[in-house]
């Protein structure tokens, strides 16, 4: 037993420290299967373990924040004001915490109302909460294995026996072969957690519950960000449609003027045809914009938990939105403790670690203690009298003597799953830093784009006015006017798109930083439901739950 205990303890420390090569060398020297086979006999092993107790397998170590990780080689501290609605200057506040209700930074009551409705009605939130309750109930169910199980039986049997089985011919009337047997019995069994199989199972269940907890946060974050992004896109399409409709109206008025001048012989038919072509081209751009807005509205309704025909027309105006002037920017070292997808991946890593312990414990013997007591009597009144009492006590040890290496390879599969979860966790961390870096670059460059588009629109408007004046003076041709009108349309549409991009960039940054879920409570009373019967929650399960809640509150 001593050798087996030392082996698993050393292996656990090496695995927890990530020393795969060191562990492989250790296992090649000692031999995993040989160490188990050379251990003391099963009974001595079980007794010694029962006295000392141990949990085989690696003890999970929370991954440290990546050293030297950052968002950019040289991070800009601010972006300049574009002197237009939706183009306010912004400053990054490194180390500032993200507020729980981050959407209120836009100072829009309509956005807050949309977010609240989506959270209350969207089925994805209810689904995530149900998955969390399921995981927690599984934790409680498996934690019951720490306690003994007791089964009670009571019954009455009417029996008649043949006298022949007792060596009697049955001719004697004094030999009674017909009787009633009353029986009451309680059987108790208990499997001590000698090698920590149960505690590793419950540890894995706790990690699975934590995974579902962070999945709920990820669902909440994705839904709120999608609602705001869809509302901004809807506002952008509405503005583009309004700009296009205004220009179409201007083109029609210009066409009417040209038509009257043509009737008077002041302009050529080519000028009228060119203006009619420009009008048709502008009108052709409206249906795609209207289609895009209608589909965006449908998507927004789905986020709100409504059907498309339940659209009440709520919308926001880009002109009424406010860019937050101070943007919170988490320290790179804190990002891994804020992103719900990173924490969910860490929970999966923890569960994979616990599964190694379960697979290791399956390779070792199992001790079972049993006891039963009750009473058997010929009448109900005689039950539980001293002369009718009966009991039994027992203990057994069982273990796999030969399985062709099946248990060994099952454990190796769990080790490989742990290594896979480690790689997936690292990939999730890389993606998280990429998301933040992308959002920061988008804010920087889209701010520059909006400044350029504002300047381009101003220049296009001046160019159009000059072209009109020159055309009236006869110093330029009408195609020049047409080209300047088309440039003005494109410049205005591009400016609207750039305005919307500024808001969308801010949403993307706050989402990439984790959305401040640690500053609010996203669980409804149904998701936080706990067993009302204290017996149904074992002390160890209660301790694991308390530890998980403390970890959540710490974030």
Image: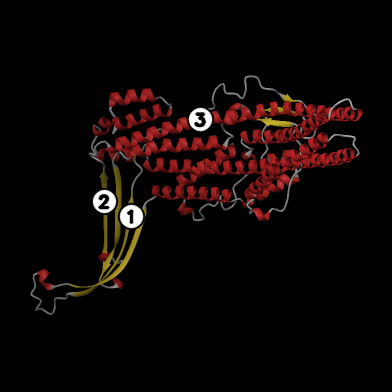
Residue picked out by circle 1 = 188
Do the numbered discs 1 and 3 sit on residues whose CB atoms are within 8 Å? no
Q: Is residue 385 above or below residue 71?
A: below
State the SS at label 2.
strand
| Of the image marks 2 and 1, the number of the one nearer the N terminus | 1
State the SS at label 1.
strand
| Image coordinates for residue 266, horizontal then vertical, percent | 90, 35
Q: CA distance from mark 2 to mark 1?
A: 10 Å
Residue picked out by circle 2 = 394
Q: CA distance from mark 3 to mark 2?
A: 52 Å
Residue 351 is labelled as none
Q: Is residue 220 above or below residue 26?
A: below
Q: Quadrant of residue 98?
A: top right
Q: Residues within 10 Å of mark 3 (few under 14, many from 20)?
A: few
Q: Residues within 10 Å of mark 1 (few under 14, many from 20)?
A: some
| Image coordinates for residue 199, horizontal then vertical, percent | 41, 42
Look at 50% across and 53% down and name the residue there. 531
| Of the image marks 3 and 2, the number of the one nearer the N terminus | 2
């Amino acid at each position: 037993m001593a050798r087996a205990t030392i082996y698993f303890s050393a292996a656990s420390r090496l695995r927890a420290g990530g020393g795969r090569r060191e562990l492989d060398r250790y296992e090649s020297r000692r031999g995993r299967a040989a160490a188990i086979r050379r251990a003391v006999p099963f009974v001595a092993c079980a007794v010694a373990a029962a006295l000392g107790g141990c949990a085989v397998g690696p003890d999970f170590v929370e991954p440290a924040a990546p050293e030297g990780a950052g968002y950019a080689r040289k991070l800009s501290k601010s972006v300049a004001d574009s002197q237009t609605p939706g183009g306010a200057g912004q400053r990054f506040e490194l180390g500032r915490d993200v507020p729980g209700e981050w959407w209120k930074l836009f100072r829009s009551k309509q956005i807050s109302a949309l977010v609240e409705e989506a959270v209350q009605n969207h089925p994805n939130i209810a689904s995530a909460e149900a998955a969390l309750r399921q995981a927690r109930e599984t934790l409680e169910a498996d934690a019951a294995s720490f306690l003994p199980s007791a089964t009670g039986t009571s019954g009455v049997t009417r029996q008649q026996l043949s006298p022949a089985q007792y060596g009697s011919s049955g001719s004697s009337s004094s030999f009674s072969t017909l009787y009633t047997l009353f029986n009451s019995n309680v059987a108790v069994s208990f499997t001590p957690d000698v090698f920590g199989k149960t505690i590793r199972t419950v540890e894995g269940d706790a990690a699975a519950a934590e995974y579902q907890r962070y999945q709920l946060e990820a669902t909440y974050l994705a839904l709120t960000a999608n609602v705001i992004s869809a509302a901004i896109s809807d506002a952008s399409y509405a503005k583009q449609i309004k700009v296009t409709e205004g220009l179409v109206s201007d083109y029609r008025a210009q066409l009417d003027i040209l038509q009257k001048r043509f009737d008077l012989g002041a302009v050529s038919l080519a000028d009228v045809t060119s203006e009619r072509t420009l009008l048709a081209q502008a009108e052709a751009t409206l249906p795609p914009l209207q289609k895009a807005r209608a589909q965006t509205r449908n998507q927004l309704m789905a986020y709100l938990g409504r059907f498309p025909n339940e659209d009440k027309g709520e919308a926001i105006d880009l002109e009424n939105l406010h860019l937050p002037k101070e943007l919170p920017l988490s320290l790179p070292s804190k990002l891994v403790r804020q992103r719900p997808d990173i924490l969910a991946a860490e929970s999966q890593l923890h569960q994979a670690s616990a599964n190694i312990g379960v697979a290791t414990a399956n390779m070792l013997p199992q001790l079972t203690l049993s006891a039963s007591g009750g009473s058997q009597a010929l009448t109900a009144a005689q039950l539980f009298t001293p002369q009718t009492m009966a009991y039994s006590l027992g203990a057994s040890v069982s273990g796999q003597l030969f399985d062709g290496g099946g248990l060994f390879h099952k454990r190796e599969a769990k080790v490989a799953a742990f290594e896979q979860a480690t790689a997936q966790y690292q990939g999730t961390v890389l993606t998280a830093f990429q998301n933040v870096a992308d959002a920061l670059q988008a804010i920087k460059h889209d701010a520059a784009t909006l400044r350029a588009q504002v300047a381009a629109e101003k220049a296009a408007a001046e160019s159009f006015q000059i072209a009109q004046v020159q055309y009236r003076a006869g110093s330029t041709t009408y195609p020049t006017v047409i080209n300047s009108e088309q440039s003005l349309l494109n410049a205005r549409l591009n400016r609207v798109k750039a305005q919307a991009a500024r808001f969308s960039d801010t949403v993307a940054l706050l989402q990439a930083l984790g959305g401040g879920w640690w500053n609010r409570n996203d669980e409804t009373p149904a998701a936080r439901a706990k067993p009302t019967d204290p017996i149904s929650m074992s002390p160890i399960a209660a301790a694991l739950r308390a530890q998980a809640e403390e970890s959540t509150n710490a974030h």
